[in-house]
Image: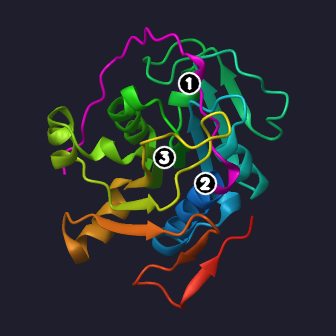
Amino acid sequence: MEPLESKRINVVHERIPSDNYKTPLEIAKWTVDRCMEISEKYCGKSATKLRMLEPGCGDAQPFSRYAASQGISSFGVDIREVDINGAGNVTVLKGESFLDMPGEGTAILYSQKYDIIATNPPFIYGIEFVNRAMDLLSPRGVAAFLLKLSFMSSQSRLEFFEQRPPSEVHILSKRPSFAHGRTDRGQEYGIFVWNGEEVDKKIRAKRGRLTRVFWQRNKDWEIPLLADQDGDRVVVTK
C-alpha cells in the first residue's frame, strides 16, 4: 500500500466546552493494552521498549498517563494550554498543534517514530489526525483512535477508507460517559486500529484488506479475546 502524504493543516478552531470531552480511563486503558498486545504478538516488544504519543492529550492525558504507568516512554501534545500538573512521567508539549508541520516547539516530536499512537481526536479532524499519526508511526507500530461510528460513513471519507482501511474496529456497546458526565446522546463510538507497514503486511497476508469488527461489552470491560489468540477471555478490571 502506497503511503499517504499528510498535508499541512492550519487549524483555526476555537474549542468549545462540548468539544473538550475527557476520555474515561477505562477506555484509554483498554486501548493502550490492546496496542501492547498487538506489539507483543507481532514484534515481541515489551512495554519498557516502547515509545508512545498521545496527540490532543487534553488536561487529563488519559492514554499517555496510563501508558507511562506501564513503563512506556510517553509523550503528549495539545493545541491548548492544557493543565500538566498531573501528567506525571508524561512529557507534554502544550500550546502546540499536532497537525502543523514541525516548528520550533514540535521539532522533538517529529524527530522520532512511535510504537503506539493513541487518542480521542477532534471529530472534524479525524482523517488529518490519522494521516499525521501514520507519518510518525514506526513500521512496527500500532495506532488506535476513539471515534464516532459515523466516521465510517460519508462520501468525503470514502477514498480515505479505500486507501487506508483499519485492521480492527471495536464497537463500544455502551456509550462512553464523557460528555460532562453524561453519554453523548445519539452518538455511538468505537476504537479504530491501524498498524505500521511491517505489522500491517503480516496481518494482511492472511486476510487481505478486510477489517475485523468486534463488539465490546465495555459496561464491565469483559473483553472476548480475538479468534487467533489463545484462551477464552481476558477481564480488564476497573
The crowd level at tag 1 (other Cα within 10 Å; few <14, some 14-19, many 20+) is few
Residue underneath mark 3: 146
Q: Residue lying farthest bottom?
A: 231
Q: Which amino acid does label 3 sit on?
A: Leu
Q: Which residue is drawn at 54% across and 64% down?
A: 34
Is 60 magenta? The answer is no
Is 8 magenta? The answer is yes
- Callouts 2 and 3 close, C-beta under 8 Å: yes
Q: Distance between the residues labelled 3 and 1?
A: 16 Å
158 sits left or right of 107 in the view: left
Q: Which of marks 2 and 1 is in front?
A: 1
Q: Residue at x 69, y 37 (%)?
A: 61
Picture quarter containing residue 119?
top right
Q: What residue type is labelled 1?
A: Ser
Measured as percent of width and height from the top left, residue 211 is found at 27, 63
Query: Callout 3: helix, strand or loop?
Result: strand
Q: Which amino acid does label 2 sit on?
A: Ile
Query: Callout 2: helix, strand or loop?
Result: helix
Q: Quick check: 218 above or below 155?
A: below
The crowd level at tag 3 (other Cα within 10 Å; few <14, some 14-19, many 20+) is many
Range of magenta residues: 1-26
Residue underneath mark 1: 18
Q: How far apart are marks 2 and 1 (CA)?
A: 19 Å
124 sits left or right of 185 in the view: left
